Amino acid sequence: MTHFDIAGRSRVPGAAAFLAGAVLLTGCGGSGASEGDGPTRQDVASLRSGAPDGEATAKAAPSPDAGRPQLRLDSSDAERNRYWHLYAMCLKEHGHKMLPARGPDSVDDTDHSATARAAVKACANRLPLQPPEMDRASNPHYDDDFRAYVKCLNREGLEVTALPDDSGWTYDGNSTMSAAQQSQVDRSCTLEAFGGRAK
């Protein structure tokens, strides 16, 4: 069992609309209003962009994460497995090497061929996004939460060591836990460490 951090992917911050170089023009007479009456409708410049109502004045580039399935901390195993299955099947359909002896959804991560790179690119919109709490880019407490997660795993008997960059962990030895027990410990520690306090 390995915990992966995919926070290294590129992210596009939320777009902010702004108006640059706007110039306000005021009328210089000829409005028909007498002096002292204040500005009339014709004397006040409009900041309308010229775009039809309802259209954004500035179009932001679409996020590379748009359309990708978003996992939550409380996503069920069935939901997670379904999303990962769809991603693996997409890679397989696009020619990425698989490891069928390890299971139908086992992707050969040593395949760095041009075909594999093209498959990863073609299937990018199917790669599940980790919960925001487990994404270093959106969780300012990520490193603290990750250390608490690894501490919990060890407290529960999994015996793991964190990678130096907090992007994952490795086993300290052979675990005596069943796969189901390991999965349960991983799930409960993830919820405890990443979802256990208000951010």
Image: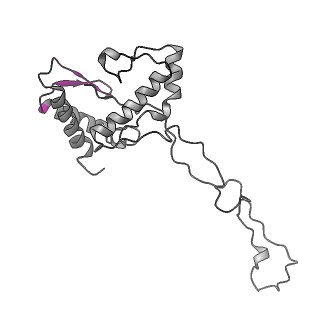
In the image, 88 versus 124, the foreground residue is 88
In the image, 42 versus 155, the foreground residue is 155
Q: Residue at x 24, y 34 (%)?
A: 147
Q: Residue at x 21, y 43 (%)?
A: 192
In the image, 14 versus 144, the foreground residue is 14
User: Picture quarter containing residue 37?
Assistant: bottom right
Toward the right, the furthest residue is 30
Image: magenta residue range: 155-174
Locate residue 182 relative to residue 4 in the image: left or right.
left
* Position in image of residue 196 (x %, y %): 23, 47
Is residue 95 magenta-colored?
A: no
Residue 84 vs 75, above or below: the answer is above
Could you tell me if residue 75 is visible in this image? Answer: yes
Which quarter of the figure is the N terminus placed in?
top left
Is residue 160 magenta-colored?
A: yes
* Position in image of residue 33 (x %, y %): 82, 84
Residue 123 vs 107, above or below: the answer is below
Locate residue 90 relative to residue 105 in the image: left or right.
right
Q: Residue at x 78, y 74 (%)?
A: 43
* Position in image of residue 44 (x %, y %): 75, 72
Q: Residue at x 85, y 79 (%)?
A: 31
User: Picture quarter containing residue 156?
Assistant: top left
